[in-house]
């Protein structure tokens, strides 16, 4: 990685044919700033800042190799670094130049059998990088078909490509494709030329809305880059876009331009990315209309929004940067009908200008406020651009489908701290304590850079929560972001008043993120519908249960917000929320059950507890589990708007079981066994079993087993409550006693009544209470 501008000047050797191109490519000196191109490129930007002299264009007929005419000796290719091109004349020759100059293995794809051939190449394993060289032309016109096919292949082969640095070298014609490859060959010189230029984030939102405290890029010329000016990291935000300032800043050289904001494949960031010009038109040419002859969305100041100026209509080819990130929806779209009119998507326009590489997506993408840090983090912490994009995709699985972002460019383009040394500082001291489920780090870190990067050295950071604390009253810890793609990193932004200590101490605790057990959230969401089926007699238990359900929903939302996140609050404030919510949910069940049991003297029939409609029954061959009689009766019915229930009856034992039955709502199996009679002075034992062994759900359970109606004299123990864990079976052993003579010796129903995650279950056994 270059550290200065002492790199050889760039010379582009202009070749009038593929044969000449191949000959020049074989004779170019490696690493000396020479590269062949086809024809004379209409744009030769991005080989150095526009304020500099630019590359030297030399006709091949007037070019003399720097090695006195001797072709450089061929170096053996690395089989793990694949350069794969469509077997088309221009792609074949241009890809061959890249492969030979960079020691990659060249493979050609037959257009008729390319999928099987590419699958075979990926199946070899042990790959270090994959570079696809594809045409975006058909005859004299644009044709994005191969870009769409390549992305479709990537998404159907996500597992094979996951973690592999890969990129697509593609252009609208052979000349532009040769220029993209030339930039890869002289990347050493390009990086050196832009070393003093700042990296700039172009954001449609305000810096405050993004929780971003990077310094803004001043419109006054002459602002230096480097550590004294924020490490070369700058932001152009909403306020610049709503004034004329951003148009001035857009003409500045930048080592990185990161666009973040609303957009479409032809327009982004309020006209600061304008895709209305065909490639055949110069990027600075005035443009009065949008695509298809339509008007610009903001043709005049105030026409679109009262404080919005007319869109500046800046072509992506106008920006002066070697690397562009288009975090704007569909900037890399390939299915637009405008391709037929010579107008590709914003990303292809950008790659036809200054950038050596463009990171983009072809769908709507979703980014959270602090996720701009992810872009800086993956670029700073990766060895090459392909690895950075791969890590960005792993860090943003929520952005869209497989591979929300892809690279147009060479995946082996260098990135990392050597390219941007002023972005992030590393800890000068780091002590790590590893527990079975947690990790504690104490780090001494500098505060003189925009960010501090702390490698966490753990796995599964996406399912963890990291707490960051410090005891320094003069320290402002204002930005925390956890990059969860392996290896995980914590990025922290710190500020200290002038004259303070240059070092700060951070305590960093990483623990598994709190989560509600499976099944509780689903139960909480459905509870408001289910309680509508409860009878009026149960109404005292409704409000506490609804409050506990709403609390579960709030806690789940909190859990999802802290998972994979770094926080500055005390750990106990977060880690206690799930146990507290589970306890409240269980106590609400116990309270609702207590109200239901007050109905026992009048009989605990299902229709006294919950409503039922649309009954339908049929006989079944299943025998009664109590007396063995067959057939038995199965009856189903609706109970409220969100529940279907099933009763099981025996002609001898009457009701056996009443429980919910819905394929989408798994419930544990309930069974009760007990003697069929009890006499004065006798104690009988009932066994209640709730079997959850086949389910992965967690249940709150409150229940009781007792005789209903009056006159039996049978004493029952207090109700019980417990949490039933996934895969577990719970057994309650219940002793029922008859100490004296019953007032009425008769047959009674022993009812096992349970409230399970907000749903009632009942098992019944007919028992004779004897007088002697």
Image (tube, grey):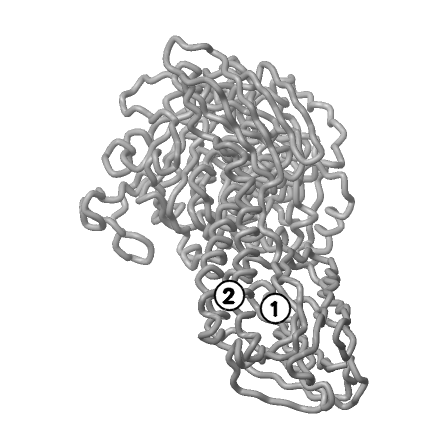
For the question of whether residue 101 can be seen, the reply is no
- Image coords of residue 660 (percent x, y): 61, 74
Q: Is residue 77 left or right of residue 492?
A: right
Whether label 2 touches label 1, CB < 8 Å: yes
Is residue 51 placed above or below 36 in the rendered structure? above
- Image coords of residue 605 (percent x, y): 58, 80
Judge by depth and name the residue closer to the eye, 458 or 215. 458
Q: Quadrant of the C terminus?
A: bottom right
What mark, if any, has residue 452 been given in the picture? Answer: none
- Image coords of residue 649 (percent x, y): 69, 85
Residue 741 sits in quarter: bottom right
Judge by depth and name the residue closer to the eye, 444 or 3. 444
SS at circle 1: loop
Q: Is residue 238 left or right of residue 480?
A: left
Q: Is residue 730 left or right of residue 346?
A: right
Inter-mark Cα distance, 2 to 1: 10 Å
How many other residues sit within 10 Å of disc 1, few (<14), some (14-19) or many (≥20)? Answer: few
For the question of whether residue 118 can be seen, the reply is yes
> Which residue does the numbered mark 2 point to in the structure image?
526
Residue located farthest toward the top when viewing the structure as drawn: 499
> Which residue does the numbered mark 1 point to in the structure image?
665
Is residue 137 placed above or below 458 in the rendered structure? below
Residue beneath the point at 50% across and 31% down? 376
Residue beneath the point at 27% across and 21% down? 220
Q: Earlier in the sequence, mark 2 or mark 1?
A: 2
Judge by depth and name the residue closer to the eye, 286 or 443. 443
Q: Quadrant of the N terminus?
A: top right
- Image coords of residue 586 (percent x, y): 57, 56
Residue located farthest toward the right when viewing the structure as drawn: 628
Residue beneath the point at 55% across and 42% down? 563
């Amino acid at each position: 990685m270059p550290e200065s501008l002492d790199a050889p000047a760039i010379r582009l050797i202009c070749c009038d044919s593929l044969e000449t191109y191949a000959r020049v490519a074989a004779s170019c000196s490696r690493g000396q700033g020479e590269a062949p191109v086809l024809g004379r490129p209409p744009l030769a930007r991005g080989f150095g800042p526009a304020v500099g002299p630019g590359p030297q264009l030399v006709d091949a007929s007037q070019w003399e190799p720097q090695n006195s005419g001797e072709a450089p000796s061929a170096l053996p290719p690395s089989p793990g670094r694949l350069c794969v091109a469509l077997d088309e004349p221009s792609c074949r020759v241009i890809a061959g130049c890249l492969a030979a100059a960079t020691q990659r293995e060249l493979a050609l794809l037959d257009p008729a059998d390319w999928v099987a051939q590419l699958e075979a190449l990926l199946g070899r394993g042990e790959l270090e990088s994959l570079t696809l060289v594809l045409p975006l032309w058909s005859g004299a016109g644009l044709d994005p078909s191969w870009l769409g096919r390549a992305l479709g292949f990537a998404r159907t082969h996500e597992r094979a490509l996951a973690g592999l640095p890969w990129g697509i070298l593609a252009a609208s014609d052979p000349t532009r494709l040769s220029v993209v490859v030339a930039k890869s060959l002289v990347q050493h010189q390009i990086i050196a030329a832009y070393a003093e230029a700042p990296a700039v984030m172009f954001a449609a939102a305000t810096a405050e809305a993004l929780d971003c405290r990077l310094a803004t890029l001043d419109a006054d010329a002459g602002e230096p880059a480097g550590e004294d000016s924020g490490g070369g990291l700058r932001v152009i935000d909403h306020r610049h876009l709503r004034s004329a300032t951003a148009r001035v800043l857009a003409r500045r050289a930048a080592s990185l331009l990161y666009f973040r904001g609303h957009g479409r494949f032809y327009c982004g960031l309020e006209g600061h990315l304008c895709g209305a010009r065909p490639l055949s038109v110069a990027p600075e040419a005035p443009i009065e209309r949008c695509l298809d002859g339509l008007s610009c969305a903001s043709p005049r100041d105030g026409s679109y929004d009262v404080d919005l100026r007319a869109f500046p209509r800046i072509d992506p080819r106008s920006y002066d940067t070697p690397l562009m990130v288009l975090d704007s929806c569909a900037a890399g779209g390939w299915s637009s009908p405008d391709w037929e009119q010579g107008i590709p998507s914003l990303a292809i326009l950008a790659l036809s200008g200054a950038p050596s590489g463009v990171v983009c997506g072809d769908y709507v993408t979703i980014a959270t406020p602090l996720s701009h840090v992810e872009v800086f983090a993956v670029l700073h912490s990766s060895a090459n651009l392909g690895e950075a994009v791969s890590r960005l995709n792993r860090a943003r699985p929520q952005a869209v489908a497989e591979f929300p972002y892809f690279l147009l460019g060479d995946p082996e383009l260098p990135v990392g701290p050597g390219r941007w040394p002023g972005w992030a500082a590393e800890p000068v001291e780091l002590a790590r304590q590893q527990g079975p489920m947690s990790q504690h780090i104490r780090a001494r870190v500098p505060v003189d850079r925009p960010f501090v990067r702390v490698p966490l050295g753990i796995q599964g950071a996406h399912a963890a929560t990291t707490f960051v604390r410090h005891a320094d009253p003069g320290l402002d810890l204002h930005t925390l972001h956890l990059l969860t793609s392996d290896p995980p990193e914590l990025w922290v932004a710190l500020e200290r008043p002038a004259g303070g200590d240059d070092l700060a101490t951070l305590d960093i605790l990483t623990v598994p993120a709190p989560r509600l057990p499976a099944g509780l959230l689903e139960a909480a969401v459905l509870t408001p519908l289910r309680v509508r089926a409860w009878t009026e007699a149960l109404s005292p238990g409704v409000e506490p249960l609804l409050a506990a359900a709403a609390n579960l929903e709030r806690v789940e939302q909190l859990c999802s917000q802290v998972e994979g996140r770094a926080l500055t609050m005390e750990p106990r404030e977060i880690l206690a929320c799930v146990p507290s919510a589970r306890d409240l949910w269980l106590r609400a069940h116990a309270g609702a059950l207590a109200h239901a049991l007050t109905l026992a003297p009048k009989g605990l029939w299902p229709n006294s507890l919950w409503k039922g409609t649309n009954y339908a029954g049929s006989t079944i061959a299943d025998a009664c589990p109590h007396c063995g009689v067959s057939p038995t009766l199965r009856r189903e019915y609706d109970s409220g708007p969100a529940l279907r229930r099933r009763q099981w009856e025996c002609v001898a034992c009457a009701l056996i079981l009443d429980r919910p039955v819905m394929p989408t709502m798994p419930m544990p199996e309930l069974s009760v066994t007990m003697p069929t009679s009890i006499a004065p002075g006798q104690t009988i034992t009932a066994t209640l079993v709730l079997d959850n062994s086949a389910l992965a759900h967690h249940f709150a359970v409150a229940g009781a087993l007792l005789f209903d109606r009056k006159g039996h004299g049978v004493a029952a123990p207090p109700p019980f409550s417990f949490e039933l864990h996934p895969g577990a079976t719970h057994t309650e052993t219940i002793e029922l006693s008859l100490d004296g003579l019953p007032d009425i010796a008769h047959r009674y129903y022993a009812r096992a009544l349970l409230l399970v995650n907000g749903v009632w279950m009942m098992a019944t056994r007919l028992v004779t209470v004897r007088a002697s």
